[in-house]
Image (cartoon, rainbow, N blue to C red):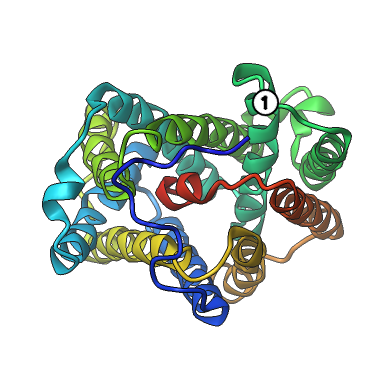
Amino acid sequence: MTVPKAASAPSAHAGGTRPLRGIGLKIASVCIFVIMATCLKAAEGIPAGQLVFYRSLFAIIPVIGWLVWKRQLVAGLKTANPLGHVLRGLIGVASMGLGFFGLTKLPLPESTAIGYASPLLLVILGALLLKERVFIYRWTAVIVGLAGVGIMLWPRLTLLTHPAGLGAEETLGVIAALGAAFLSAFAMLQVRRLVQTERTEAIVLYFFVTASLLSLLTAPFGWVWPNPQQAALLVTAGIAGGIAQILLTACYRYADLSVIAPFEYTSLLLSLIIGYVIFGDIPTLMMMIGASIVVCSGIFVVLREHYLGLDRIKSREANTP
């Protein structure tokens, strides 16, 4: 299954094959995304919908600056599928909202690790909705990876062992984070459709614009006026998210997906460090075992797809965490 490239899209390796540069850009983007998540988590008391708004609105600033610098702002505004961007925005806003809610309720490393389930779920959705051929190797990796998610989250799912468990904030956070991972997989499917006619620049820019507008609909449901510290954290998170997206897009110009993708999991190490130092989060043994299984399964899926020639660079570039 090869994703058709947009007709006007630049080559994936327009910058030449420089794997070390590609890896460096990938690691930089991952680190900045973790910083973004840290800022959002530290802005305590801000509703999830409001977090989505700030994260999306202020991300537009560096993205537009990047497009102007590349002299591609006009190209970034051209679209042949506006309704497709709206649908991608709806799914993305729902995914981010649930993900940010989970982020506020769960330790940072755990919230990060749950997100790794999304590529595994994408394999299932691709088989069911797009009729993609999935062979035994990937099915095995998906099943093992989802088992790892279960191991990681089982201690949090107190609703299964305690009558009052559903009221536990961490349990609700787990449910929200899993919902975010599921919707993120749907968002990736929509991005795959968009890349057939749209440039990466347009997909990224229109997502931030639609996400900013759609998240405004949550304003009547408990938005608060942020204090100066919260406002600084929210603005920083948005700008960081935009910069990280630019670096993520750039890294695929210099190296293959199979080389770069495994470095996505460096976010878990950084989340463990930041979670412990800033938030006092101490990872449990079950969390570490489950996360390790999920990471290994995800890397196997990436390498297996590369071996089969399944190129998903465009979808990875345009999909926004």
Q: Which percent across, then down, holds residue 148?
A: 83, 45
Compared across the picture, whether 153 is left or right of 200 comes to: right
Q: Is residue 40 above or below residue 188?
A: below
Compared across the picture, whether 145 is left or right of 105 comes to: right
Q: Quadrant of the N terminus?
A: top right
Q: What residue appears at the point 67 percent right and 63 percent down from the top-left corner? A: 262
Q: What residue appears at the point 48 percent right and 71 percent down from the top-left corner? A: 254
Q: Which percent across, then down, holds residue 177?
A: 59, 39
Quadrant of the image occupied by residue 48? top left
**Residue that badge 1 annotates:** 132
Q: Which percent across, then down, holds residue 119?
A: 64, 42
- What secondary structure is found at the residue carrying circle 1? loop
Foreground pick, 193 / 140: 193
Compared across the picture, whether 196 is left or right of 277 comes to: left
Q: Which percent across, then down, holds residue 17?
A: 51, 74
Three-letter amino acid code at disc 1? Glu
* Label 1 environment density (alpha carbons within 10 Å; few <14, some 14–19, many ≥20): few
